[in-house]
């Protein structure tokens, strides 16, 4: 469920410290109260839509009039449901994801730490080092000048998408179905940079680093640093992106530079990217070890205790589909009982081969029209006309199958961390 919407006056009246954390991610100075306490200037500027030249003169407890009457939201994000305020996590309802290419304002937000203060493209550099022959440090302008620029539609999904439906509950953000999207990203191929740097025979894994801050405020700690095997890193569909849907990347989606490793958990696609290190071992950065972004290597019973040594790193995401039109709860007239169903399907490193719909609780299935992806790793759009035989309550179920014959299940394959829920999506329809 989303949090109750409140305007800023209500938030600050209840608890100014919490309001600061909610808006800006951290509280830096225990001697101050109010709107500016611990605020990252870049985050404030993103929220009001412009820089604040005299920000240093704003008094404690002051609320900018541009925000005063608005419910708490993320500037430039429309319709997202806030799941967590520290760090910020927000998902998009399924019916707002109907576009073939996800608008920037509808792409989910998943932070692991605090938003960087500086997200300016000017002066930003990216380093490639570690087990390479030619370490490099390049500006964004140099990236554009030295390497081919490409634009790809790339599907991105949080590994915990669907966690809210686990029983027993799994800890973590209680995503329902909206931590997914498929934007157009423009950038340079990660593989081109790695080839230019020259990976040594000892290099087997990447390690990704950004400028986001640890929630503790300790500058020596990283909130997250994940990586992928070199074989995956060399895919021509991995991008180091500097544009999202033809414009600058949204601050909450990683401006000014981010990594895209499509088909794998979104945590591999580091935001605010500053460094890629090539390592001679599986990367052991924060949220790469223990049970983070890992699942048991064999099926387990719901609620089972699983030794950490039996977990394996999540790689390719499972086959999945999502109904985006109509929204659940749709009303259909009894004298016109036909309804068009639309949605998207995706399958990690694989391609979706079929999408089927059911209105009789899985007894029979209706084959949907399935479009080809606009490029590998883009989601695929599907549609179907459905006739309802008589008035009453119906559920429309969607089931995707990938090109390896793997099919979405009805039930959740439970695991202790609440990852990889690819159970069938269902919507309710009332006829008559």
Image (cartoon, rainbow, N blue to C red):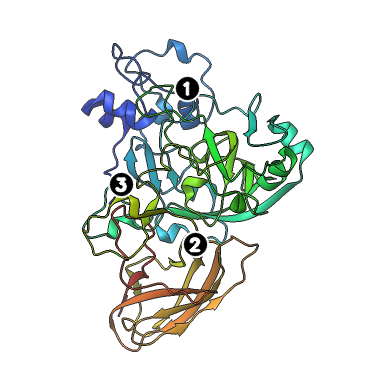
Name the foreground residue: 31 vs 392: 31
- Of label 1 and label 3, which has the lower sequence position? 1
**Left or right for 14, reference 310:** left
Q: Position of residue 255 (x, y in %)?
A: 56, 35
Q: Disc 1 or disc 3, which is closer to the eye?
A: 3
Give the structural element (helix, strand or loop) at label 2.
loop
Name the foreground residue: 183 vs 287: 287
Q: CA distance from mark 2 to mark 3?
A: 27 Å
**Left or right for 243, reference 318:** right
Q: Position of residue 161 (x, y in %)?
A: 38, 55
Quarter of the picture holding the C terminus = bottom left
Instruction: Give the label on residue 172, or none.
Output: 3
Q: Position of residue 424 (x, y in %)?
A: 37, 70
Residue at 40% x, 25% y is 65
Residue at 44% x, 54% y is 314
| Image: 254 above or below 387 | above
**Left or right for 240, reference 74:** right
Disc 2 target residue? 98
Residue at 42% x, 37% y is 286
- Of label 2 and label 3, which has the lower sequence position? 2
Give the structural element (helix, strand or loop) at label 3.
loop
**Left or right for 32, reference 207:** left
How many numbered dots are placed on residues in this image?
3
Q: Is residue 250 visible?
A: no
Disc 1 target residue? 41
């Amino acid at each position: 469920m989303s949090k109750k919407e409140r305007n800023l006056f209500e938030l600050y009246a209840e608890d100014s410290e919490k309001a600061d954390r909610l808006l800006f991610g951290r509280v830096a100075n225990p001697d101050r109260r109010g709107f500016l306490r611990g605020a990252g200037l870049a985050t404030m500027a993103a929220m009001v839509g412009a820089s604040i030249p005299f920000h240093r003169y704003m008094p404690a407890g002051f609320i900018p009039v541009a925000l005063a009457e608005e419910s708490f939201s993320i500037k430039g994000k429309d319709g997202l449901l806030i799941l967590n305020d520290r760090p910020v996590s927000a998902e998009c309802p399924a019916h707002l994801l109907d576009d073939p290419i996800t608008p920037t304002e509808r792409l989910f937000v998943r932070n692991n730490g605090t938003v960087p203060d500086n997200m300016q493209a000017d002066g930003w550099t990216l380093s490639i080092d570690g087990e390479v022959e030619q370490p490099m440090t390049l500006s964004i302008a140099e990236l554009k000048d030295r390497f081919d620029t490409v634009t790809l539609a790339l599907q991105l999904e949080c590994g915990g998408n669907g966690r809210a439906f686990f029983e027993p509950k799994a800890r973590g953000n209680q995503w329902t179905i909206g931590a997914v999207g498929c934007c157009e990203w423009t950038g340079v191929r990660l593989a081109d940079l790695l080839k230019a740097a020259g990976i040594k025979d000892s290099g087997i894994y990447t390690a990704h680093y950004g400028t986001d801050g640890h929630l503790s405020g300790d500058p020596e700690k990283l909130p997250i640093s994940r990586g992928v095997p070199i074989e995956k890193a060399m895919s021509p569909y991995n991008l180091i992106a500097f544009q999202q849907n033809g414009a600058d990347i949204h601050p909450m989606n990683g401006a000014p530079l981010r990594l895209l490793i499509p088909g794998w958990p979104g945590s591999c696609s580091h935001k605010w990217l500053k460094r890629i290190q090539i390592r001679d071992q599986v990367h052991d950065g924060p949220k790469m070890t223990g049970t983070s972004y890992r699942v048991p290597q064999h099926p387990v019973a719901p609620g089972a205790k699983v030794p950490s040594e039996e977990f394996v790193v999540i790689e390719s995401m499972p086959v999945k589909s999502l109904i985006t039109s109509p929204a659940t709860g749709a009303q259909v007239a009894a004298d016109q009982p036909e309804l068009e169903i639309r949605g998207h399907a995706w399958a990690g490193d694989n391609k979706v081969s079929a999408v089927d719909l059911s209105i009789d609780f899985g007894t029979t299935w209706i084959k949907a029209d399935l479009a080809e992806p606009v490029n590998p790793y883009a989601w695929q759009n599907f549609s179907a006309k459905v006739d309802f035989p008589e008035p009453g309550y119906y559920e429309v179920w969607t089931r995707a199958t990938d090109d390896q014959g793997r099919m979405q299940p009805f039930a959740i394959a439970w695991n202790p961390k609440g990852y990889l829920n690819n159970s069938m999506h269902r919507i309710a329809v009332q006829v008559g």
